[in-house]
Amino acid sequence: MKFNIFFILRDHFNTLRDFDLNNKISASDVFLFYFLPLCISSGLMAFCNNINDSINDNLIAIFITVFSIFIGLLLNLLVLNIDLKQKFQESKIKQIVAKQTFINISYGIVVSILGVIFGLCTYLQIWVLPQIFTFLSYFIMVHFILTLFMIIKRVYKLFETI
């Protein structure tokens, strides 16, 4: 299938491994990147249910705008990362970090696209249960911010040694 993105999701999840003796998925990373956004999104849903719908609509519109901007920025960062990977031919660890960064950036693009889709579904209220898409929009935003911090850290580490 031409638009199958599940390998990007799988590869990103595999970058959450602890690269020590056991090579297992890091429970703290799973908590940080998935469980914490669930908790924060639940809190936002509780808080935002008590505010005006127009404020909530404005918040979702801002999310859509932010995700749209980050799609373009992450695509440019993807190209930069490809160029960097070619410069790290002599270092095995830098090659691994560059590959994982490439995977994380690709995942960030997918999350941004999902954020735009969920945001539009929430903003246009075209579904029967808009609260589900509002929750998904909040979750994707928090998850994306945390993933973006991971990407920034990895890119910084790659540039730090140049």
Image (cartoon, grey):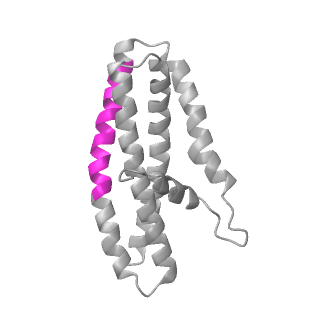
Residue 68 location, x and y as percent? 29, 41
Please, which residue is most extreme toward the front here? 1
Please, which residue is most extreme toward the right here? 22
Residue 53, magenta (yes or no): no
Identified at 47% across, 77% down, the residue is 94
Residue 81 location, x and y as percent? 35, 68
Identified at 40% across, 11% down, the residue is 52
Residue 57, magenta (yes or no): yes
User: Is 53 above or below relative to 115?
Assistant: above
Residue 124 location, x and y as percent? 32, 20
Q: Main secondary structure of the magenta part?
A: helix
User: Is 132 above or below relative to 9?
Assistant: above
User: Is 44 above or below relative to 107?
Assistant: above
* Relative to 100, 57 lies left or right: left
- Residue 15 lies in quadrant: bottom right
- Residue 99 lies in quadrant: bottom left
Between 108 and 4, the one nearer to me in the picture: 4
Between 124 and 36, the one nearer to me in the picture: 124
Residue 35 location, x and y as percent? 62, 40
Q: How many marks?
A: 0
Residue range corresponding to the magenta coloring:
56-75
Please, which residue is most extreme toward the bottom here? 90
Q: In which quadrant is the C terminus drawn?
A: bottom left
Identified at 33% across, 70% down, the residue is 82
* Relative to 116, 147 lies left or right: right
* Relative to 101, 116 lies left or right: left
Between 47 and 65, the one nearer to me in the picture: 65
User: Is 113 above or below relative to 123?
Assistant: below
Identified at 66% across, 58% down, the residue is 25
